[in-house]
Image: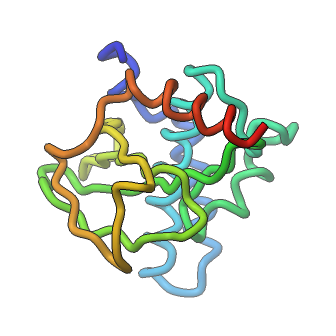
Amino acid sequence: MKDNLTELPIDQQVYNLALGYASEQANLQHGLKIFYNTMTVWAVNYLLGRMNFETLIDKDDDWTVGIESALELADVMLPGIGKIQCCRIDEGETRIIVPAQDDRIAYIFVELPGSVEKVKLLGFLPAADIHGDTVEISVTNLQPFDRLSDYLEAIQLQTV
């Protein structure tokens, strides 16, 4: 995938949306989780849209309505294909612990720097590569996004 799709500037509207969802939470810890999940889900949804995959978020007239159901678990549903888990990695991290989800088809990893002015799409792993309840994953083991489209299309063909 081209470099201009792996690093995305955060649009002010998306930032404000994330702040709004975070401020609705009962405590700061949960608010931060929702803030970062919003950013991560937005980035993955954007990537999938650029790859011409439709998500349930895209089906809503108002993106803010469609994302609400995805924020708690940070996932994106592709109709007819399955759910993708959006995994946030802090800037500079090289490893992340990921809880395995039975109903996921892939995991996409997004780096959020401390400034939150941009996000960096790092790569993905097919669900078949995640074994056990929780897995420690090295960023160096992620697959590049130029393989993601073929992977998702193969799953789509299997479900037809």
Which color scheme is applied? rainbow
Where is residue 94 drawn, in percent x and y? 12, 53
For the C terminus, the image quarter is top right
Q: Residue at x 53, y 67 (%)?
A: 34
Q: Nearer the viewer, residue 140 or 41?
A: 140
Where is residue 28 drawn, in percent x and y? 45, 81
Q: Residue at x 45, y 31 (%)?
A: 148
Count every numbered label the image shows and give the total. Answer: 0
Q: Is residue 41 left or right of residue 33?
A: right
Query: Where 7 falls versus 140 (above or below)?
Result: above
Q: Is residue 121 left or right of residue 13?
A: left
For the N terminus, the image quarter is top left
Query: Where 76 falls versus 53 (above or below)?
Result: below
Q: Residue at x 19, y 46 (%)?
A: 141
Q: Is residue 57 left or right of residue 70?
A: right
Q: Nearer the viewer, residue 14 or 101?
A: 101
Q: Residue at x 42, y 55 (%)?
A: 128
Query: Where 138 falls versus 69 (above or below)?
Result: above
In the image, farthest residue toward the bottom? 26
Where is residue 121 drawn, in percent x and y? 35, 36
Q: Nearer the viewer, residue 155 or 18?
A: 155
Residue 99 falls in image quadrant: bottom left
Where is residue 125 drawn, in percent x and y? 36, 47
